[in-house]
Amino acid sequence: MLKFTQRQVNSSFMKKIIKKANLAGFCYGVKRAIDLTTKIKQDNPQKNVYILGELIHNNQVIENLKNLGIKVIYDIEDIVEPQNSICIIRTHGATPEDINKIQSKGCEILDATCVDVKKVQEKAKSLIQEGYKLIIIGKNNHPEVIGIKAHAEENQTGKALVLSCAKDVEEYIEEIKSAKKIGIVIQTTQKTENLQNILAEVAKYAKELKVYNTICPTTSNRQKEAKNLAQEVELMIVVGSKTSANTSHLAEILSNITPTIHIETEDEIDNFEKQIIEAKSIGVTAGASTPEYIINNVIKKIEMKGDI
Ligand code: SF4
């Protein structure tokens, strides 16, 4: 039986129960990336420190890093004085091509790719090497998926397909039918339901199927815990960036169980005042890239609404 951190807000008008998920907030991959990035700048104040793309999907964290003098770049050509620079590879990883480009400029690399993302890259590559037609489940334009695909295809003739939902299978039925064997990996922050739905479709056409469930343990445990919490409350609040895959997936999953609000910070609470005041019990969870202080600010503001 899972236990949630519970607070009770009493007022002359109402009693509101607020339950916070234990797995809300930074995962180990995000925490490691932020610690590495902050430390490298502290240890090398004279060097330019760049991050290729946003380290994680959270605007507040990115702003804090920028305030330390760390620059976020989207184009490797924006690295100035490469010999006096360090470029950080974010949690989602990067393509081998980008890594080679940075190195060939003479710029040092600090790899903050999450260990779980590295595992998917390796599994995807080994599937192609073993002759499987590779399917990556995830969003085509997500940096993690772009990196997995590029690592898997590096120096290989085999190409990977990217499927974001079961409906996408229709487009590739002939390719799947003609492949001797199909290998599947999944973006670390995807929903288990999506893996199950796509598998059910692919299995109709594949001769042989090898599946690695590469959803990271943090994501699957967080989803399980949040589902349990959602069954106990009248309203769920998911805190985190709208561009964060794991946060958006949490909100989607929970909205099938109970009314769910997805907000980035406490500033959006006022937009949902009526729902929050009326709910006698509220569950709060957050994505893997949401800082603890933002979750606490949200809870404080909900408590204040409870006192109205
Ligand atoms: S959500 Fe999972 S894969 Fe992504 S950084 Fe966290 S632990 Fe790593």
Image (tube, rainbow, N blue to C red):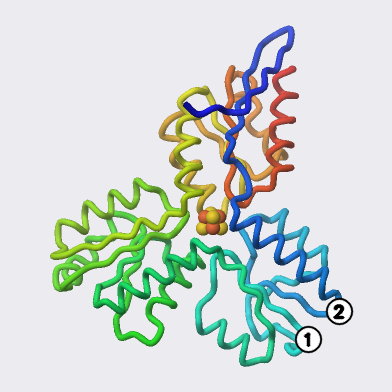
Which residue: 71% across, 75% down? 50
Q: Is disc 1 placed on a helix, strand or loop?
A: helix
List the single residue furthest toward the top: 12
Question: Height in image: 281 above or below 176?
Answer: above
Q: Separation of disc 2 and disc 1 at Cα?
A: 8 Å
Task: Report which residue position mark 1 lands on.
Answer: 84
Give the quadrant of ligand 1.
Answer: bottom right
Count up the numbered dots: 2
Which residue: 76% across, 62% down? 65
Q: Earlier in the sequence, mark 2 or mark 1?
A: 2
Please give left or right for residue 54 compared with residue 134 in the image.
Answer: right
Q: Amino acid at mark 2?
A: Gln
Q: For residue 152, which numbered disc appears in the image?
A: none
Question: Height in image: 141 above or below 232?
Answer: below
Viewer-nearest residue: 217 or 15:
217
From the top left corner, tell me how far across and down residue 92 is, in percent.
Answer: 54, 65
Q: Amino acid at mark 1?
A: Asn
Q: Is disc 2 placed on a helix, strand or loop?
A: loop
Please give left or right for residue 201 compared with residue 55 in the image.
Answer: left
Viewer-nearest residue: 252 or 210:
210
Res 300 → quadrant: top right
Which residue: 65% across, 34% down? 271
- Disc 1 crowd rating (10 Å Cα; few below 14, some 14-19, many 20+) is some
Q: Do residues under tags 2 and 1 come within 8 Å of each other at their CB atoms?
A: yes
From the top left corner, tell me how far across and down residue 253 is, in percent.
Answer: 43, 40
Question: Height in image: 29 above or below 223?
Answer: below
Task: Report which residue position mark 2 lands on.
Answer: 46
- Disc 2 crowd rating (10 Å Cα; few below 14, some 14-19, many 20+) is few
Q: Does mark 2 have its CB less than 8 Å from ligand 1? A: no
From the top left corner, tell me how far across and down residue 48 is, in percent.
Answer: 79, 79
Which residue: 68% across, 39% down? 295
